[in-house]
Image: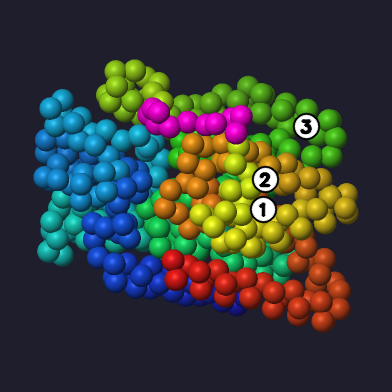
């Protein structure tokens, strides 16, 4: 019991510290500029909330010039009365509880109840830190099912402090990555704990369907992460067929499908409102150059190159290869997944993904990339004190580098 109390106290202190860091960071940058919580892409994700809870999707009722003030992340078609955003509503759904709290407190605390005053920006910060905490807690729980507690804890701390997850949880709180990271961590814990849906009740399968639907809704390319259900820890074809059987079993398939549908339908309704069609590729002229992937640029370019800004990902690659050499198939899965998503990201028309810190699209995948890292840490903990100390110092150096680059950025 005493250990659990210390654990809860530690979580509370961590949450309070991250809140301090994000509020301190944003207190220096003001509102309605590149650094603010509701700007450009972040505003495009967010706009569903004021549209639903304050303006009933009537463009004319929005504050004047609010699109320009928030970096044109969405468009107000005042002539046709429509609120237009190319982004799906998944991030907004996860931010909704915090937005509603801000909406109810705005006027009593002296702020405009318009969806864009400072208190709404603050709600985004709190949401991001909350989901960061959820993601790290579930990642720790997931890793602890596979490795020893200390190795799992060290890996989780390294993932947070040594990568651009820190930046997208503390600085760019309105972007989708920390929200996807939380969902990925929950997904991994769920499938591990449930033995890949082998023993699931109907209501649990329904919730699992909601989780899957939300993962894909936030970023449709997240569908690649769902491959973990089929291929993580795969040993032979029999195990693969067993997992497929678990999914297609009607007792599981029907509630999972219902859960996914519940999440997807509101998006279809919005697309129909926006364009008159249930299915809409809202990115229009933005697409993939499948025959010209920019692998080297995505990995090494000064313009957001993955390994330059977050060398920790090199540890992921090394640890995955080490797992393969030890005949641990999860290492092979991580390597293949890394290459597949790298092909996807490097084929996007803007392979640098705009004004980001490092290759931001890899951030959420740190949930699964933590597996080989934890495996490596656990193996090293069985070696000499010198090796353990050297690797710990190395991880600390990566964390210092990451935090230095983050605040310089």
In the image, which is nearer the foreground, mark 2 or mark 1? 2
N-term-proximal mark, 2 vs 3: 3
Secondary structure of the residue carrying numbered label 3: helix
Kindly give the residue lying farthest to the right in the view shown: 326
The percent coordinates of residue 172 (x first, y second) are 40, 58
Is residue 143 visible in this depiction of the protein?
A: no
Contact between labelled residues 1 and 2, with CB atoms less than 8 Å apart: yes
Position of residue 392 measured from the top left corner of the image (x, y, whole percent) = 71, 76
Q: Position of residue 132 (x, y in %)?
A: 48, 59
Residue at (35, 60) in percent of width and height: 125
Question: Quadrant location of residue 44?
Answer: top left
- Of callouts 3 and 1, the N-terminal one: 3
Q: Quadrant of the C terminus?
A: bottom left
Residue at screen point 40% across, 63% down: 171
Task: Tell me how far mark 2 sits from mark 3, CA to CA.
Answer: 20 Å
**Which of the labelled discs sits on residue 240, or is there none?**
3
Would you call the spot at circle 2 few (<14 residues within 10 Å), some (14-19), or many (20 or more)? Answer: some
Q: Nearer the viewer, residue 6 or 276?
A: 276
Q: Is residue 197 above or below residue 409?
A: above
- The circle drawn on residue 338 is 2
Question: Are dots 3 and 1 in contact, CB under 8 Å?
Answer: no
130 relative position to 106: left or right = right
C-beta proximity under 8 Å, tags 2 and 3: no
CA distance for labels 2 and 1: 9 Å
Circle nearer the viewer, 2 or 3: 2
- Residue 369 - label: 1
The answer to whether residue 354 is left or right of residue 74 is right
Q: Is residue 251 magenta?
A: no
Span of residues in magenta: 282-292
Residue 314's place in the image compared with 347, above or below, is below
């Amino acid at each position: 019991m005493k250990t659990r109390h210390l654990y809860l106290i530690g979580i509370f202190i961590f949450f309070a510290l991250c809140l301090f860091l994000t509020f301190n960071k944003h207190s220096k940058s003001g509102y309605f500029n590149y650094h603010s919580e509701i700007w450009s892409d972040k505003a495009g994700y967010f706009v569903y909330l004021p549209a639903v809870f304050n303006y009933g999707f009537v463009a004319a009722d929005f504050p004047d010039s609010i699109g320009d003030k928030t970096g044109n992340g969405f468009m107000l078609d005042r002539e046709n009365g429509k609120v237009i955003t190319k982004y799906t509503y998944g991030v907004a759904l996860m931010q909704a509880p915090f937005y509603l709290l801000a909406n109810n407190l705005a006027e009593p605390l002296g702020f405009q109840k318009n969806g864009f005053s400072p208190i709404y920006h603050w709600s985004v910060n709190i949401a991001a830190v909350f989901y960061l905490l959820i993601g790290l807690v579930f990642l720790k729980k997931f890793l602890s099912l596979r490795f020893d507690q200390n190795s799992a804890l060290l890996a989780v701390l390294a993932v947070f402090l040594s990568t651009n997850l820190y930046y997208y949880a503390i600085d760019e709180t309105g972007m989708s990555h920390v929200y996807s990271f939380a969902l990925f961590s929950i997904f991994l814990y769920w499938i591990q704990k449930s033995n890949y849906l082998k023993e699931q009740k109907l209501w649990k399968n329904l919730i699992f369907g909601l989780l899957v639907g939300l993962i894909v809704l936030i970023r449709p390319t997240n569908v690649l992460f769902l491959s973990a259900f089929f291929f993580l820890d795969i040993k032979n074809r029999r195990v693969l067929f067993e997992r497929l059987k678990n999914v297609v079993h009607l007792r599981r398939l029907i509630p999972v499908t219902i859960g996914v549908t519940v999440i997807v339908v509101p998006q279809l309704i919005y697309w129909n409102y926006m364009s008159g069609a249930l299915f809409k590729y809202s990115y229009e002229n933005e697409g993939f150059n499948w025959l010209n992937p920019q692998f080297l640029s995505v990995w090494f370019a000064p313009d957001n190159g993955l390994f330059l800004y977050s060398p920790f990902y090199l540890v992921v690659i090394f640890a995955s290869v080490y797992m393969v050499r030890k005949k641990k198939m999860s290492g092979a899965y991580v390597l293949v997944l890394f290459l597949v998503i790298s092909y996807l990201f490097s084929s996007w028309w803007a392979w640098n993904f705009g004004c980001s810190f490092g290759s931001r699209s890899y951030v959420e995948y740190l949930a699964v990339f933590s597996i080989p890292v934890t495996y490596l840490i656990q193996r090293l903990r069985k070696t000499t004190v010198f090796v353990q100390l050297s690797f710990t110092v190395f991880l600390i150096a990566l964390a210092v580098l990451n935090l230095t680059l983050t605040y310089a950025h």
